[in-house]
Amino acid sequence: MKTIKLYLLYILAASLLLASCKPTVQVPRANHGTADFTRYIAVGNSLTAGYADGGLYLAGQQNSFPSIIAKQMQTVGGGSFSQPLFTSDQSNGSGYQALTGFAADHTTPIITPVTTKLAVRGTITLPGLGTIALYTKYSGALENYGVPGIKLSDILNPAYGNGNPYFERLLPNATPTNTTDYLDFVTVKSFTFFTNWLGNNDALGYATSGGAGDVLTDKTTFNTLYITLITRLTANGAKGACATIPDVTTIPYFTTVTVPIVLATVQKANPAVQALYINALVAGTTTYAPRAATPADLIVLTFPTSKIGVPNAGGYPYGLHPLNPIETQYVLDANEIALVKDYVNSYNSTIKTVASSKGLAVFDAFTFLTNIKMNGLLINGLNLNSNYISGGIFSLDGVHLTPRGYSIVANQFINAINAQYGSNIPLADVAAFSGVKFP
């Protein structure tokens, strides 16, 4: 009996020892660190507004990265976050693109414009801008100041709200009587924290137009304006986070319709074809000349491939002869790419330097999205990449993000904020957000 009792005591002691060695998981307590999220505002362009699938519409707005950040901030004392949402009756906003099926080859997507339940109140024709749509005015509380199309070079222009219908929608007056510039508009009411993702369009507009429809913002001008912007945003003690500008060559808009793919398709029908011809920028000049395309030249997603081979008045087939090359607006050629990268590198140097001087957090979108293009992204059991449609991150326009893509960006901002300010804002569940919506 004594032996049994001793045996039981040994078992009890061993159990207590094992229990004392059981690992415990310490979950950090949510806190705001040294930042104040009472009133968080988002400054930026279409990416900030939740633009997706070639348009601004209610479902996209509801999944904007600032709205996701704001929801997570509310667990550490963040306040309410209002966006200029379209109503349910006008939920399709500006209109957008929808995936409605695939062609007979089972790979070519059928993209259909959505033109019902729009928030268009009319149109106006403006000198130099042509006819633009006017959207239903929004006059409620506002924390998301994302304006599709805006450049850093536009933020001090008092007339900008007359020519950009997305900004015009937020202003009290009707075009062409607005005189409030963007920077004054976003800073008129006090705030405690901000995210800023301006600057993308200062390079993107030039890139997506193949260098034909826009210009790159002068580097010195960009630097001066960025200092002005951040100085104003931090003037009253607000803290914040900025993002760098992505490498435009990593987005599906430039990586889906490639020179080798188009050439291989042509050669199936006509094996004698040896090259595609493009109108390309001559290195070190501002002039263009026809030459054979290489894989280093990027064709835009919207290129009308049906034009290939159609003869011009001289009988030369489009894109297959130097006397009828693919126009520059459809190609970001190798020399234009080098030019864009040079400017983006300069812009990003400015962003990092100015943000650092004010002690702001920085989300390096350039590095992050480049890494996804090279290696993909495994997160929450999801295998994601930068491929068009199937990748899960980019929407149907090949530039802007899906709800899932915006949730990933939101988390990257949160990581940068937590690291800079010692806060512990919880991350959003990326798996809870959708990629491209299939029919």
Image (cartoon, rainbow, N blue to C red):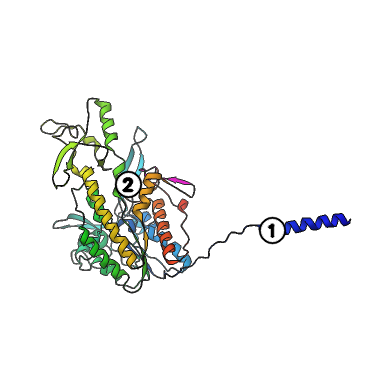
Q: Residues within 10 Å of mark 1 (few under 14, many from 20)?
A: few
Q: Residues within 10 Å of mark 2 (few under 14, many from 20)?
A: some
Q: Residue furthest left?
A: 314
Return the residue at label 2.
250
Q: Residue furthest right?
A: 1
Return the residue at label 1.
19
Where residue 254 sits, quadrant-wise, is top left
In the rendered image, the vertical position of residue 244 relative to residue 280, given as above or below = below
Mark 1 and mark 2 lie on one chain; the one further toward the N terminus is 1
Q: Is residue 197 visible?
A: no
Where residue 34 sits, quadrant-wise, is bottom left
Q: Magenta residues?
A: 381-391
In the rendered image, the vertical position of residue 60 relative to residue 99, given as above or below = below
Residue found at x 88% / y 57%: 2
Give residue 308's position: percent from left, percent from top. Answer: 21, 34
For the C terminus, the quadrant is top left
Disc 1 to disc 2, how far (Cα)?
Answer: 52 Å
Q: Is residue 55 visible?
A: yes
Magenta stretch contains residue 383: yes
Give residue 252's position: percent from left, percent from top. Answer: 32, 44
Give the label, 1 or 2, closer to the camera.
1
Question: Helix or strand or loop: what does disc 2 sit on?
Answer: helix
Q: Residue furthest bottom?
A: 236
